[in-house]
Each structure stands twice: as structure tokens, then as C-alpha cells.
Amino acid sequence: MSSSAPSVGGSDVRLVVLRRRAAGVSSINVSGPWVLGVGACCVLALLAGAFVAGFNVGSRGIDLGDGSPAALARAALQQKSELDQLRERVQERVDSMSARIGQLNAHVVRLDVLGKRLAEMADVNSSEFDFSAAPAAGGPESESSVPVSAPDLSGMLDDFESKLSQRESQLSVLEQLILQRELRQQTVPEGRPVVRGFMSSGYGVRQDPLSGEFAFHRGIDFAGNRGDLVIAVGAGVVTWAGYKLDYGNVVEVTHGDGYITRYAHNERLLVKAGDTVSRGQQLAVMGSTGRSTGPHVHFEVLRNGNPVNPLSYIGG
């Protein structure tokens, strides 16, 4: 048990300390001024702590100064300036994204045009590849959306643009391959060199109609009427259009890939050297010039400079 009582003069304090494990009582006399000093120090420490805590909290926001109207106005101007800077940065990012999206849209338009052209060249059913509509897609609805940051979006745009460029290059190469295939199909000799007429003499050894002797016939003769049209059996370039001994008025067309076709004994020529012709284009008017017994066209096919049987290219 402990008790404390003021001293006789009322200015001292006696502290009585009881010890549990040790017998006896201890007492300490403390003067009044010392107690007041310790209390004052505690109050000052509490005030200092509150001031520091308030300063730290205030420094995290906008400095309002002393709370006067002028300080509040300065704080408002500072906040407006920071918002304007943030708005400018956001607008710059939006402008950059808009430009990138415009470039990607241009890529998509080019791919659409190229895709339509390739579909037409390859004779693909337009209902199977409709480049004017988005392809069908679907799937279960996502339960939660995944936020995408601006740097992530920029990286996705870079990757998408790179893939579009690769696809455009691949489609361009495919277009060239299709064009080469079509060009080869158009240039290889195929078909009859006349619109009307019949085959009057075949390729190979035959009895010469003028000398009566057996000789090798380098082509096929198609008989018809004077004035009938002679046409090209493949696309190419006219490398000769004029008169040659025995052949009379003759046209030679170089088709590429080692092919040359020859059309002889014409009455009149409709093309000249250097002209580009297509399959079925009119080359001459049938006649009987040169070493000939009547109106017909002598048709030859040469491959790498050697005559070959035109029957293989005439078909049915």
C-alpha cells in the first residue's frame, strides 16, 4: 500500500514506492518546481509532434500558404497550370495514336484492294472472300476486362503495323506470281490460227504440192477463202512482218519461253514489227503469196529455234 502527501510547506511532493518481492518501503521527495518543469517539457513535445505531422500532411497537396486570398489564388493558378500541362501531354498522345491509326487504315485499304484484285485474278468466288465485310467471329463473353496502358497499346500498334506490312509484301509477291502464271498461260501457243477454214496439210514428211517430191513439211496448212482472217494463237511481240522468199507475206510472233509462231502466204498484213499482240488478235488477211497453190495460211511453231508439231498446241 502506498500514500503520498504534501510536505509541511506545501511545495514538495513525496513519492512512496512499494516493492512486491522485497520488503520495505522507499520514498522519494520531489520539489514542486521540478514537477512543473517536467510537465512543461511534455506539453512542448506534444505540440512539436503535432506541428511536424501537420507539415508532412500539408506538403503532400498544394501549398495553400497562410490561407489568405492571395495564397489561395496562387494555389489555384498552380493547379490550373499543372492541369494544362497534363492536358497537352494527353493530347499529344492522342494525336500520335490517331496518326498511327490513320497509317494502319491506309494499309488495310491497300490490302483490301490487293485482295480483291487477287481474288478476281485467281477466279475465286466473291461470296467466299468478301473484302468489304469483316470476317465472322465470336466466342464467350469475358467476365472481366483487362486494362491496357498507353505503352502497351503503342506496342500492340507497332506489332500490328509490322504484320500488315508483311502481309502486304506477301500479297504483292503472290500477285506477281499470279501475273506470271497468267502471262505464261496467255503467251504459250494454243488454238487455231484461223477463224474459219480446215487443215489441208499436216506436219512431217509429205509429197510437195509443187515439185511432187517427198519433203519435210515444217508446219500445218489451213485452207480457206481469200480474205479470211489470220489470228495470233498467243500473246507476244511481232518480231517480223514482211515478205520472205517461199513464205510470201509472213508474220512472226515471239511469245517468250522459247516460243515463236509463224503465219505465212498472207494477202495483207495487219501488224508491224514491234507491235504487241494478244491471243485471238487479227494479224493478217489470208492469201496465196510466195510458194503457194491457193489461199491458205502456213502455220509453224518453233521452240528454242527448232520446229515442233503445231498439232500439239492446236488442240481439238
Image: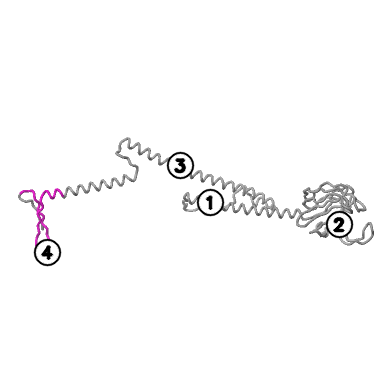
Q: CA distance from mark 3 to mark 4?
A: 78 Å
Q: Position of residue 178 (x, y in %)?
A: 69, 54
Q: CA distance from mark 2 to mark 4?
A: 141 Å
Q: Evaluate whether residue 248 shows in this view.
A: yes
Mark 3 vs mark 4: give the one in front: 3
| 216 or 179: nearer the viewer | 216
Q: Residues within 10 Å of mark 1 (few under 14, many from 20)?
A: some
Q: Amino acid at mark 1?
A: Asp
- Looking at the rendered structure, the secondary structure element under dot 2 is strand
Span of residues in magenta? 9-37
Q: Are marks 2 and 4 in contact (CB under 8 Å)?
A: no
The residue pinned by badge 4 equals 22
Q: Which mark is residue 220?
A: 2
Going from N to C along the chain, the mark reached first, 1 or 2, is 1
Looking at the rendered image, the quarter that the N terminus falls into is bottom left
The residue pinned by badge 1 equals 158
Q: Amino acid at mark 3?
A: Glu
The residue pinned by badge 3 equals 88
Q: Residues within 10 Å of mark 2 (few under 14, many from 20)?
A: many
Q: Are marks 3 and 4 in contact (CB under 8 Å)?
A: no
Looking at the rendered image, the quarter that the C terminus falls into is bottom right
Marks counted in the figure total: 4
171 relative to 219 in the view: left or right: left
Q: Position of residue 258 (x, y in %)?
A: 77, 57
